[in-house]
């Protein structure tokens, strides 16, 4: 059986230990010859790297493992690149979330004004990364999880339009499928989802079980009766439980489809802002929670020299999905995933060059996505406004255009007011000096 070579970009990510555990779990189905962790922050990565040494010594016989900050070592002779970088780290995420809140507007780190700021930081590093990978490994699959995925996918698609081995993907649909599976008492791997939208901005239209019965009406009824919680509720911070709980509100107002949890920021921006503490946002919760736990546990395991007493400090869904996606490509399994691809008629009344999120079967030749036909006016309007925000954000990056940036933020449903958009933009420009291109 062929053994695969993998590089994890953003080896110092809080999600890396979970991903490493998933690779160990899957070592028979998706065997590795070489695994390299790469990060621009050597110190941060070393903590996870030393944990990995102990893990692999005990649980992955024969694996050739290294961690490095050297691109030459990282990207040579690679089959898969798992990319999960965060340009600017949590310090910048905190600003993305808090600066807009000074003007009464939620930051939201992926699709709101926070995501706009994060996007303008991520694009440069993602383009550089792909160029670096392609210098050494022309055929490698680049599986990208780096956020804000919608904006990153749009920018990457413009620059590397001919490159058919770059796949942008998000784990939120898988998390939702696991959550639906739990409330139905069914295996989420058996679902066949019909999904449409943009990243963090989509809906499950149907969810067929293995006999072809649509579970969407059943799930709606259960959510109305009993509310909604993530499958891994015991591992979640309160803010995520609150986020899942609001799916019930969204279903009461817009009962057609099952919404991605992120839609609440765009449907109820004022209500959500009123519930936020401007001095303590999700970035603080993560820095004081997941980040601390992950790094403390990795240090402890490395010092002890065994994973025998290791605690679970991660969520399985994320790592499992990344490995299963690679496995589906490597072994041409054609499993179903919700992925981000160029529209080209998949949603037939949305422009062709939109990067949309839909179900695809995923095999050795990449995703083969399924069309969903025409969508109704409300959903079309929502999507087109957010799409315009995403495209104008990417235009602003490539053209260095202040005016495009202002238009982008004005169109974002969380912002909507052009005077507020200008104030937020000016504050974000000052905070992102050195990360963004100059906007003139
Ligand atoms: N698509 C999804 O559904 C999904 C799910 C979870 C996390 N993510 C994304 O994964 C990324 C990591 O998240 P996190 O919360 O663990 O952040 P994190 O800050 O803990 O980890 C990111 C790592 O990337 C490194 N890094 C920054 N710039 C880099 C570059 N140019 N090259 C290589 N490494 C670089 C940092 O030093 C850091 O160690 C984020 O982009 C996050 O949004 C995506
Ligand atoms: O606020 P964070 O850093 O905890 O999460 C932001 C990410 O949220 C989604 O990811 C889920 C992920 O789907 C799930 O596996 C689980 O581990 O929780 C994460 C949230 O904690 C989202 O899809 C990502 O894009 C975000 O980065
Ligand atoms: Mn996501």
Image (cartoon, rainbow, N blue to C red):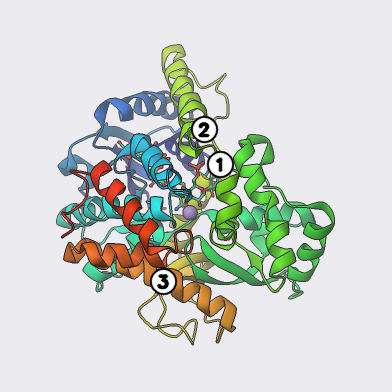
Residue sitting at x 40%, y 83%: 351
Where residue 163 appears, as percent x and y from the top left, is 26, 69
Which of the 4 quarters of the picture holds residue 43?
A: top left
Cβ atoms at labels 2 and 1 below 8 Å apart: no
Residue at the far right in the pictured view: 225
Q: Position of residue 68 (x, y in %)?
A: 24, 34
**Which corner quadrant of the figure contains ligand 1?**
top left
In the picture, the disc for residue 176 is none
Q: Is residue 366 visible?
A: no
The quarter of the picture where residue 386 lies is bottom left
353 shown above or below 421: below
Residue located beneath label 3 in the image: 387
Q: Which residue is mark 1?
A: 276
Disc 3 or 2, which lies upstream in sequence?
Answer: 2
Relative vertical location of residue 8 with respect to residue 419 in this rendering, above or below: above
User: Mark 2 vs ligand 2: CB under 8 Å?
Assistant: yes
What distance separates the C-alpha of mark 3 from that of mark 2?
29 Å
- What is the count of numbered marks? 3
Q: Position of residue 33 (x, y in %)?
A: 34, 43
Label 2 vs label 1, nearer the camera:
1
Q: Residue at x 30, y 46 (%)?
A: 427
Nearer-N-terminus badge (2/1):
1
Tell me if I can see residue 423 in this picture: yes
In this rendering, the label closer to the viewer, 1 or 3: 1
Q: Position of residue 235 (x, y in %)?
A: 63, 35
Q: Is residue 283 left or right of residue 378?
A: left
Q: CA distance from mark 1 to mark 3?
A: 26 Å
**Residue receiving disc 2:** 285
């Amino acid at each position: 059986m062929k053994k695969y070579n993998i590089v994890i970009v953003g080896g110092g990510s809080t999600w890396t230990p979970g991903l490493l555990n998933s690779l160990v779990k899957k070592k028979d189905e998706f065997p590795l010859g070489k695994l390299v962790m790469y990060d621009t922050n050597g110190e941060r990565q070393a903590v996870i790297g030393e944990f990995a040494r102990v893990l692999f010594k005990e649980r992955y016989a024969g694996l050739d493992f290294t961690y490095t900050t050297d691109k030459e070592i990282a990207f040579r002779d690679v089959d898969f690149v798992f990319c999960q970088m965060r340009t600017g780290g949590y310090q910048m995420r905190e600003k993305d979330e808090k600066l807009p809140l000074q003007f009464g507007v939620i930051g939201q780190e992926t699709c709101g004004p926070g995501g706009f700021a994060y996007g303008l930081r991520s694009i440069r590093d993602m383009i550089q990364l792909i160029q670096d990978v392609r210098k050494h490994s022309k055929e490698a699959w680049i599986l990208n999880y780096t956020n804000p995925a919608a904006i990153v996918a749009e920018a990457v698609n413009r620059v590397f339009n001919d490159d058919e081995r770059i796949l942008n993907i998000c784990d939120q649909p898988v998390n939702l499928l696991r959550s639906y599976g739990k409330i139905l008492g069914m295996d989420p791997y058996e679902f066949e989802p019909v999904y449409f939208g943009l990243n963090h901005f989509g809906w499950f239209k149907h969810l067929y079980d293995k006999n072809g019965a649509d579970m969407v009406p059943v799930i709606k009824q259960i959510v109305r009766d009993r509310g909604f919680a993530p499958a891994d509720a015991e591992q979640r911070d309160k803010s995520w439980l609150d986020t899942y709980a609001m799916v019930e509100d969204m279903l009461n107002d817009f009962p057609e489809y099952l919404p991605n949890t992120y839609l609440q920021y765009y449907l109820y921006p004022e209500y959500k802002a009123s519930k936020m503490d401007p001095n303590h946002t999700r970035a603080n919760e993560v820095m004081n929670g997941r980040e601390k736990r992950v790094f403390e546990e990795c240090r402890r395991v490395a010092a002890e020299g065994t994973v025998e007493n290791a605690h679970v400090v991660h969520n399985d869904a994320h790592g499992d999905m990344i490995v299963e996606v690679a496995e589906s490509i490597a072994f041409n399994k054609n499993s179903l995933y919700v992925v981000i691809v160029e529209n080209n008629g998949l949603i037939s009344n949305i422009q062709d060059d939109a990067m949309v999120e839909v179900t695809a079967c995923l095999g050795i030749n990449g995703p083969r996505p399924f069309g969903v036909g025409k969508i109704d006016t409300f959903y079309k309007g929502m999507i087109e406004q957010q799409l315009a925000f995403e495209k104008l954000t990417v235009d602003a990056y490539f053209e260095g255009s202040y005016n495009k940036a202002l238009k982008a933020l004005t169109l974002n449903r969380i912002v909507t007011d052009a005077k507020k958009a200008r104030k937020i933009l000016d504050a974000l420009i000052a905070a992102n000096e050195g990360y963004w291109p100059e906007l003139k």
